[in-house]
């Protein structure tokens, strides 16, 4: 009989873990894999996949913000901040704006945020200047790398 593996994030520490369950056994064993992952990335001179995805997300977001305001992606971003009716009940959904807000909140000493259409317009003006957008993306990446090294 084979064991099953499930990758997850610890609710108590926020660190990546792997849960191992074997058939016929009660419960499961959880292994913290942060140290093993960190040593693998350092040994290969590579960055974690989460950092690569973060950079790609912000490059794509900048590309979208530089496009015409009538494209569907820009309309969806603008529509996110239009409040019509009551808010959703239950657990907040993990949407692109929620992830972008979390990324921006990691930057220390920054007045940048993404909580209103005014903030979106401010980010749109930054995105028009590619060198400024690249600097912003680098600051977000560095903040994410710093928060990962703390865990």
Image (cartoon, rainbow, N blue to C red):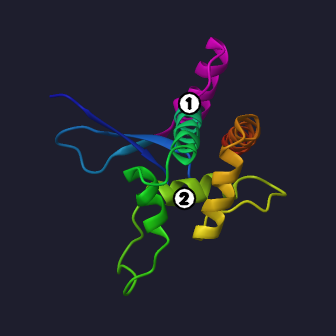
- Residue 83 relative to residue 47: left or right: left
- Residue 134 relative to residue 50: left or right: right
Query: Magenta includes 40?
Result: yes
Query: Magenta includes 5?
Result: no
Q: Earlier in the sequence, mark 1 or mark 2?
A: 2
Pointer 1 local density, CA inside 10 Å: few below 14, some 14–19, many at least 20: few
Assess whether mark 2 and mark 1 are in contact (beta carbons under 8 angstroms).
no
Helix, strand or loop for disc 2: loop
The quadrant of the rendering that contains the N terminus is top left
Q: Residue at x 47, y 41 (%)?
A: 17
Mark 2 — residue?
Answer: 12
Q: Residue at x 70, y 40 (%)?
A: 133
- Residue 139 relative to residue 63: left or right: right
- Residue 4 relative to residue 116: left or right: left
**Residue 45: where, in percent of width, then height?**
66, 14
Q: Is residue 50 visible?
A: yes
> What segment carries the magenta color?
31-50
Number of numbered markers? 2
Q: Nearer the viewer, mark 1 or mark 2?
A: 1
Pointer 2 local density, CA inside 10 Å: few below 14, some 14–19, many at least 20: few
Q: Residue at x 24, y 32 (%)?
A: 3
Secondary structure mostly taken by the magenta-highlighted segment of the chain:
helix
**Residue 141: where, in percent of width, then height?**
68, 38
What numbered label is drawn on residue 52?
1
Helix, strand or loop for disc 1: helix
The quadrant of the rendering that contains the C terminus is top right
* Residue 57 vertical position relative to residue 100 in the rendered view, above or below: above
**Residue 39: where, in percent of width, then height?**
63, 22
Q: Residue at x 19, y 28 (%)?
A: 2
* Residue 98 vertical position relative to residue 151 in the rendered view, above or below: below
Q: Quadrant of residue 25?
A: top left
């Amino acid at each position: 009989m084979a064991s099953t593996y499930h990758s997850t994030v610890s609710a108590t520490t926020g660190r990546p873990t792997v849960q191992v369950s074997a058939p016929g056994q009660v419960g499961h064993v959880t292994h913290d894999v942060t140290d093993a992952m960190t040593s693998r990335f350092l040994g290969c001179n590579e960055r974690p996949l989460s950092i690569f995805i973060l950079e790609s997300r912000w490059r794509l977001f900048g590309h979208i913000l530089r496009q015409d305001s009538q494209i569907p992606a820009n309309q969806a971003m603008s529509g996110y901040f239009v409040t019509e009716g009551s808010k959703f009940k239950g657990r907040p959904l993990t949407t692109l704006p929620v992830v972008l807000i979390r990324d921006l909140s990691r930057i220390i000493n920054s007045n940048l945020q993404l909580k209103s259409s005014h903030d979106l317009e401010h980010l749109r003006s930054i995105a028009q200047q590619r060198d400024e957008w690249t600097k912003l993306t680098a600051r977000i990446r560095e903040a994410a790398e710093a928060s990962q090294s703390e865990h």
